[in-house]
Amino acid sequence: MPTFIIDCPRCKAKVGAEQQGFIDRSYYDDDAGEPFGERILLGRCPKCTLSLVGRAEQIEFAHYQGSDFDVFGDVVRVYPEPPKVFTSYRIPKTLTHSLLEVERCLQVGANIAACVMLGRALEALCRDVLDQDGASPGAATRATSTKPKKNVMLGAGIRELRDRKIIDERLYDWSVSLQAMRNLAAHPEDISVSREDAEDLQVFVNAITEYVYDLTDRYKEFKEREEEKKKPRPSAAEMFGGIFPGPEQA
């Protein structure tokens, strides 16, 4: 029986899953000007028998640009425990892509690389939020703040988020810890990062992303509904006055 390498969340390890089936999908992306393909694989962990579903992106295509065979990249688990999904349309692509890279790094055991990408994700969040001129998560507290410089760095960015009360002290403390870990991971220091520590930092970055974007959007929608409920509703006479004649017209 064929196998494929995938991260098992129950065993907390890479395993050779017993392949039960797969589905390939490919097409030519006119916008990108190149082909796109992926393979969805279904398997079972040989140790704990947990069902696993993974996705592998196609990186080479047979008879395209000199390739003789179809080649797929590493398998990233999409079930169970799929990557965190956010709902806000305001989340910038740089942040989204960084968070996806974090998931890939963790699933292949690249914990130091995951810390670097987590720092990149948080820095992207800082730049997006602090560079906005219009309404945003800290709009109420920004009126007296000066406009931040473009390309704000992570350290200055998280301090600005705290000073503008976009994040609280607890989130700020998490941010400082992430910054310290990112700085060590990004330089040739003799360090090791456990999977547990990297996953804790991932949970934090996911939480602050959800807090700044998704929950802010939900709160805004909630307040808008509350304001709509406060508006006086028209009476039945006002609603149907143009349809049914009044007593003087009867």
Image: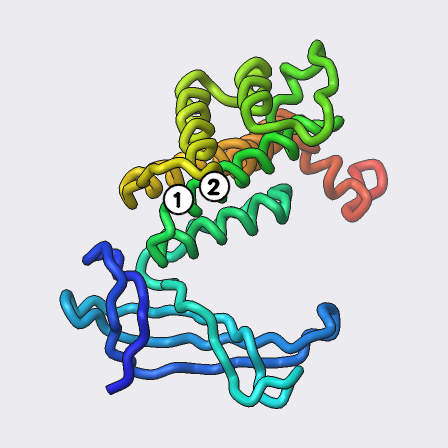
| Neighbour tally class for label 2: few under 14, some 14-19, many 20 plus, Cα within 10 Å | many
Question: Residue 156 occupies which quadrant of the picture?
Answer: top right
Q: Which residue is mark 1?
A: 112
Q: Determine whether, in the image, residue 143 is placed left or right of residue 83.
A: right
Q: Are marks 1 and 2 in contact (CB under 8 Å)?
A: yes
Q: Residue at x 73, y 23 (%)?
A: 149
Cα distance in 3D space between marks 1 and 2: 7 Å
Residue type marked 1: Ile
Q: Is residue 51 above or below residue 188?
A: below
Element type at mark 1: helix
Q: Is residue 119 left or right of residue 125?
A: left
Q: Where on the picture, by quarter, is residue 41? A: bottom left
| In the foreground, 246 or 66 | 66
Residue at image point 34% right, 37% down: 191
Question: In this orientation, does residue 222 appear?
Answer: no
Using the image, tell me which numbered label, if any, was put on residue 116. 2
Report the residue at 40% width, 36% height from top. Answer: 189
Q: Position of residue 31 (x, y in %)?
A: 74, 69
Pick whichever, 99 or 208, lies toward us. 99
Give the percent coordinates (x, y) of residue 136: 65, 28
Outermost residue, right side: 249
Q: Does any portion of residue 203 appear in the rendered image?
A: yes
